[in-house]
Image (spheres, rainbow, N blue to C red):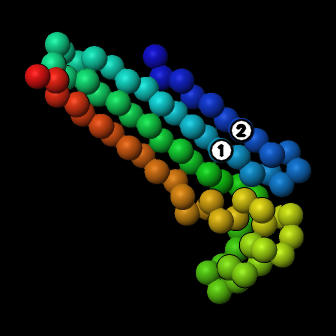
């Protein structure tokens, strides 16, 4: 089972999509997947990054480049 979650800010139209999952592949191998996607809201250009500090419409703009996906394999001895 892979839990998926969404957090949505209705005022600024920002959202966070989150997924996590893990699975035992064998007696000695384990797989874990985790990811986050930040999107929506007011986008700002690289030139205007100072605007992040100047108003509520930009409060989540700094997250627009923080998406990630992590895949982890573990081997137990």
In the drawing, what numbered circle is on residue 7?
2
Q: Residue at x 54, y 58 (%)?
A: 66
Depth check: 40 or 58 in front?
58
List the residue tagged with mark 1: 16
Split into 4 quadrants, where in the image is the C terminus?
top left
Marks 1/2 in contact by CB < 8 Å: the verdict is yes
Q: What separation in Å lies between label 1 and label 2 (alpha carbons)?
A: 5 Å
The correct choice, above or below, for 40 with respect to 9 in the image is below
Mark 1 or mark 2: whose residue is earlier in sequence = 2
Residues packed near mark 1 inside 10 Å, few (<14), some (14 to 19) or many (20 plus) = some
Extreme residue in the top direction: 27
Can you tell which quarter of the image residue 71 is in?
Answer: top left
Residue 70 at x, y percent in the picture: 38, 43
Say which element carries label 1.
Answer: strand
Q: Residue at x 75, y 72 (%)?
A: 52
Q: Residue at x 84, y 64 (%)?
A: 57
């Amino acid at each position: 089972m892979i839990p998926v979650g969404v957090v949505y800010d209705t005022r600024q139209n920002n959202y966070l999509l989150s997924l996590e999952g893990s699975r035992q592949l064998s007696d000695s191998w384990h797989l874990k997947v985790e990811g986050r996607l930040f999107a929506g809201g007011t986008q700002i250009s690289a030139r205007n990054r100072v605007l992040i500090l100047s108003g509520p419409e930009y409060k989540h703009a700094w997250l627009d480049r923080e998406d990630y996906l992590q895949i982890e394999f573990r081997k137990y001895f």
